[in-house]
Image (cartoon, helix red, strand yellow):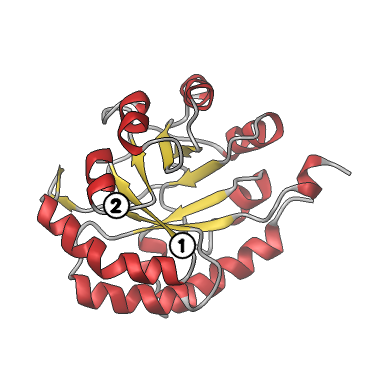
Amino acid sequence: MSKANDKPPARLYLITPSVVEPAAFAEQLKAALGAGDVACLQLRLKEGEQPASDNAFRRAAEAVLPLCHEHDVALLINDRPDLAVKLGADGVHIGQQDASYEEARRLLGPDRIIGVTCHNSRHLAMEAAEAGADYVAFGAFYPTTTKQPKFQAEPDLLAWWSELMEVPCVAIGGITVENCAPLVAAGTDFLAVSAGVWGYPGGPAKAVKAFNEAIAKHRPG
């Protein structure tokens, strides 16, 4: 049996909007998590181009962490391993310009999740995997309004990584229910989605349901 046939189906990796009102967002998240399989939630809060205040992260984390754990969903903090520890999160996602993997691991210890942005670079991904990253993230695959992507990735990068490496990969960047099929078929382990869920015309719950249906339909094998 091929590796593609053995591979578990891709899972959803939700990313928060840049600005959230904690109580209202918790209601949206509750609906989303009740609608289908979700692996994790990345708390990615910004004030313009800058990260939001520690207090904004704290208030948001207090609202969503119980919901995440109730649904067996990992909560990751974007960019800030120090905050991930303080807030009791399950891990951190770091970019190439953020804290180093080594610094993040020192702060978080051996058991929490650390994911690393690798853009469209096989070299960066290999380095991150060899260092011990729990996943590598490739993208952007499509145009996105969430941030200005400086790199363009193609589905064949996911296929190459999936065939060769055990470390999971995440596809990110402008992913929607309508365009996710090639990424699922290429073998990504996770679809990282922000606007494609929170801005979905029918609401987040319908988005999660539709994504899970697309994943089941287009999985490799």
Q: Which residue is mark 1?
A: 73
Judged by depth in the image, the label closer to the viewer, 2 or 1, is: 1
Near mark 2 (Cα within 10 A), the count class, few <14, some 14-19 or many ≥20, is some
| Rendered residue at 50%/19% (across/down) | 123
Residue 42 image offset from top left, x and y in percent: 35, 53
Observer-nearest residue: 143 or 109?
109
- Relative vertical location of residue 167 with respect to residue 33 in this rendering, above or below: above
| Rendered residue at 37%/31% (across/down) | 105
Please tell me how many numbered marks the rendered image carries. Answer: 2
Residue 79 image offset from top left, x and y in percent: 27, 40
The secondary structure type at the circle numbered 2 is loop
Q: Are marks 2 and 1 in contact (CB under 8 Å)?
A: no
Question: What amino acid is at disc 2?
Answer: Thr
Residue 139 image offset from top left, x and y in percent: 44, 39
Question: What amino acid is at disc 1?
Answer: Val
Q: Going by the image, does 168 lie left or right of 149? A: right
Residue 87 image offset from top left, x and y in percent: 25, 53
The secondary structure type at the circle numbered 1 is loop
| Rendered residue at 48%/32% (across/down) | 133
| Rendered residue at 41%/74% (across/down) | 204
Observer-nearest residue: 24 or 159?
24
Q: Going by the image, does 86 lie left or right of 15? A: left
Regarding residue 199, the answer to whether it shows in the image is no
Regarding residue 168, the answer to whether it shows in the image is yes
- Relative vertical location of residue 151 with respect to residue 31 in this rendering, above or below: above
Q: Quadrant of the N terminus?
A: top right
Disc 2 and disc 1: Cα gap in Å?
Answer: 22 Å
Observer-nearest residue: 15 or 112?
112
Residue 146: mark: 2
- Lower sequence index among marks 2 and 1: 1
